[in-house]
Image: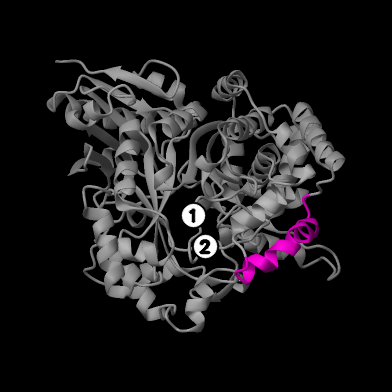
Amino acid sequence: MDDILIEILHALRAGVEVDTDFLETLMRKHNRNLSDNKQHYAKKQVIPYYLNVKENDPDHWKSWHIDPQLEQRLMQAVRVKPSRTASGVATITVLTKPWKCSSNCLYCPNDLMMPKSYLSDEPACQRAQRNCFDPFLQAAARIHTLTQMGHVTDRIELIILGGTWTDYSKNYQLWFVSELLRALTLFDDQDTFSAEVTRRRAFYDKVGFDGSRSQAQQFVEPWQSRVNNGACSYNHAWDNLYGKSALWESIAQMQTCSVDNLDRWQEANAQGTHRVVGIAIETRPDGITPAALQTLKRVGCTKVQIGIQSLNPQVLTMNDRRLDIPSIRTAFSLLRLYGFKVHAHFMVNLYGTNPTADKADYLKLVTNASFIPDEIKLYPCVLVAGTKLNKHFADKSWQPYSENELLDVLVADTLHTPPYIRISRMIRDISAHDIKAGNKKVNLRQMVEQKLDAPNQSVNEMRYREIGARSVNADQISYEVLQYETDATNEYFIQAITKEHRIVAFLRLSLPHETYVRNYAGTLPVNTSEAMVRELHLYGRSPEPTEEARRAERFHIAQSLVAQAQDVAHSNGYTRLNVMCSIGMRSYYDALGFTGRGAYQYLDIDPK
């Protein structure tokens, strides 16, 4: 591997483009002289080898004469799966412990080894189980992997999965987030970090929890068969398994955290090198209350994923989804007024619907002022074992759409999506062998986009237009302000775009309606004259030659977006900009002119 690394460095110094073709040719050349039974070299081995030498053999590392600029170019050249951090943010997905849900939907998986709605073969679920559902161990494993793959992890978004976050106790919520921050903050101090990983593993060994799939299967087996054949519900089985388990009770006693301890790790992370710039949780719309949102902003949450699935009351009832439309409306309004980004989950091909109704339902979601999320996870219903949907499949009252029908719905939905809404995903990470009927193709989004690429097709949806990791000069950017109204706010989407209408950056600005704010007087973080910046995001890479110049150019774009937000707010009579500020973005917003600490920072608007 040493010879391979030296050749890559020589190429980079000579200005040669070290791309996929270059690396594949290089690996083939060196593998040619290896025997068949010897492990062949691969791109994914380069960065772990480099980092190991840098840490454990500093004299050898110095012989390579690598300066910071060359190191950065090396990491970019050999990074594995570069799209994972193309937006400039590294995502770490973790899962909460098995827990009940306040609903029992027809289509929802009932894997007792997991929180309600998740299956143990999903990638994030496998990682969580191996790490005993411990947030510290999960975050530790993911940041180590991302680092070994060559990704920059100075800015991290935490995605916390687990069904219904607000159904967990407040103490568990505080503890879970605190441990995630602790892992990311301690990562640079490898001695302390490794000692904590060892201590945490020893705790689980002591109580008899090894995190193995076989142990979990043996634990749930007596009740899983009853759930699968409809003899009892997931919640009833959970009560008899986890609710009466001495093992899980001993683990729960460890899962406690004071507000002061959370504060400590928030402050430490804000000063660390792996800063959390966003935290997303998922819950049900009826779990969105002012009290719940107070806790969410206290732990540093910035995005809330809410399971809508359908806006048709009859379809919701037929699918046993205990949810009404007024609670969905209220959830959208409260989330905006608190400054959260709203990520809706929406399903097609539910029991009781059809392609035409699905298209109309989605159009209502993205155009009706009571809804209009910022992001959407749009995915088809599939059949898995142990769900109540199986009986409807057996009697043919529910059937999965054909591939053509499904693509037709998803293409139509994408074309109806306004330019300020992002469709983040079109599938769930359910393993193909767990799907008894329905879509099993993991490239469903790609299939949809192939149909969208037709001549004269106009696609406004955000993800389709993102610049990604491509370079763009600031002088090639223009700014566009889009306005739309919701029940509780006037929304302004300010986007920086190229001449091809690719998104380079954007800002979401909410101007709350006075009557709505007065109705919730005393519970909201905004007053009637205060606006809210709910999101500021930049994509792409600057072509500037130095890292300092690149950062300066990107910061200038952010300043331009904030300045336009000030102008919009001022012209509408607002005197202050608030921003929902994540833990790791406090100093960034300080530099943009905001002040204050805690969940929100603010910028008073110059009356000019």
Residue in view at x 81 percent, y 33 percent:
199
Report the magenta residues as a range. 211-231
- Quadrant that contains the C terminus: top left
Residue 33 placement (x, y as % from top left): 81, 66
In the drawing, does residue 394 fall left or right of residue 554? right
Res. 471 in view: no
Q: Which residue is mark 2?
A: 108
Residue 63 vs residue 448, the one in the foreground: 448
The image's mark for residue 585 is none
The answer to whether marks 2 and 1 mark residues whose Cβ atoms lie closer than 8 Å is yes
Q: Which one is nearer the viewer's eye here, 518 or 26?
A: 518
Q: Is residue 573 left or right of residue 15?
A: left
Instruction: Please rate how many residues cluster around mark 2, counting C-alpha atoms within 10 Å: few if below 14, some from 14 to 19, many from 20.
Output: many
Disc 1 marks which residue? 103
- Quadrant position of residue 561: top left
In the displayed structure, would residue 464 be above or below residue 106? above
- Magenta stretch: helix, strand or loop mostly: helix
Of callouts 2 and 1, the N-terminal one: 1
Q: Secondary structure at mark 1?
A: loop
User: Residue 214 magenta-drawn?
Assistant: yes
Q: Where in the figure is residue 290, as x and y percent of width and height?
A: 38, 32
Q: Residue at x 14, y 23 (%)?
A: 573
Total numbered labels = 2
